[in-house]
Image (tube, rainbow, N blue to C red):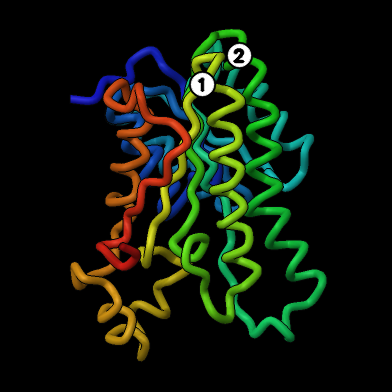
Amino acid sequence: MIELHGRSALVTGGSRGIGRACCLALARAGAKVAVNYRVETPSANLLVEEIEAAGGEAFALSADVSQRTDAEMLVDETVARFGGIDILVNNAGIWKGAPVEEISDGEWAEMLAINLTGSFHCVRAAVPPMKEARSGRIVSISSTAGQRGEANHAHYAATKGAVIALTKSLAVELAPFGILVNAVAPGWTVTDMTREDLLGPRREGILKTIPLGRAATPEDVAGAVLFLCSDLASFITGQVVNVNGGSVL
């Protein structure tokens, strides 16, 4: 059984989808959880109530991780309330599509700001207290798109590929301080962002690309995140764990 009692975690984009599943998984293993969200206040509060009802400890905090001051506030508040930060899960992200010639400067900048710069802001803020503790786990959510590309989603794929490069660089840089850095790369996962595709006309075509014949649940992805945050993964760093049902082999 994975045991995380006494450890504190910050999950960005934690109010729904993969982030919500990560919060629940970490809390059930005993971690204290800071649930970051941007606009989903009711969902975040309900999640905190669910964790507390099960005997866990959590709080919700609104912040836009694309803004450096917001990301620093998130980490500072986590440290203040929990006495430190042992785990950072970079999950906050957006997914939008368009042919490359139709992607505006604003859409490109928005994708980079949230999916990539947001992760950088949170890492930069979390590393000093982790270095002081001489331990820590950083897990960033990438995507199959960051490995094989995704037509009509070039800006999204570019950010997710960059998250993998960031992960590998940080793994080498932070290893001397006992900080392990990994990524989880989901394939098609049933969330609010993908529900229209997975329940609409594209469904059959999408499922044909997945050897296991189904899309992932958020809990499938959270299981990999939980493993990487646990002592079972104490000799794993700089890796990308694929949770895609075999669609990228």
* Image position, residue 202 (x, y; %): 37, 87
The label on residue 179 is: 1
Residue that appears at 30% across and 77% down: 209
Most foreground residue, 158 or 196: 158
Quick one: SS at disc 2? helix
SS at circle 1: strand
Residue neighbourhood size for the residue with mark 1, other residues' Cα within 10 Å, grouped as few (<14), some (14–19), many (≥20) = many
Q: Is residue 112 above or below residue 19?
A: below
- Please state the horizontal and vertical placement of residue 50, each as a whole percent of the image: 34, 37
Residue 155 in the figure: left or right of residue 197:
right
Where residue 244 appears, as percent x and y from the top left, is 32, 61
In the picture, measured across the screen, residue 196 lies left or right of residue 111, that is: left
Q: Earlier in the sequence, mark 1 or mark 2?
A: 2
Vertical comparison of 242 with 34: above or below = below
Q: Position of residue 121 (x, y in %)?
A: 70, 37
Q: Residue at x 52, y 47 (%)?
A: 91
Q: Which mark is residue 131?
A: 2
Q: Determine contact: label 1, label 2, CB under 8 Å.
A: yes
In the rendered image, the quadrant that contains the C terminus is: bottom left
The vertical placement of 165 against 147, above or below, is above
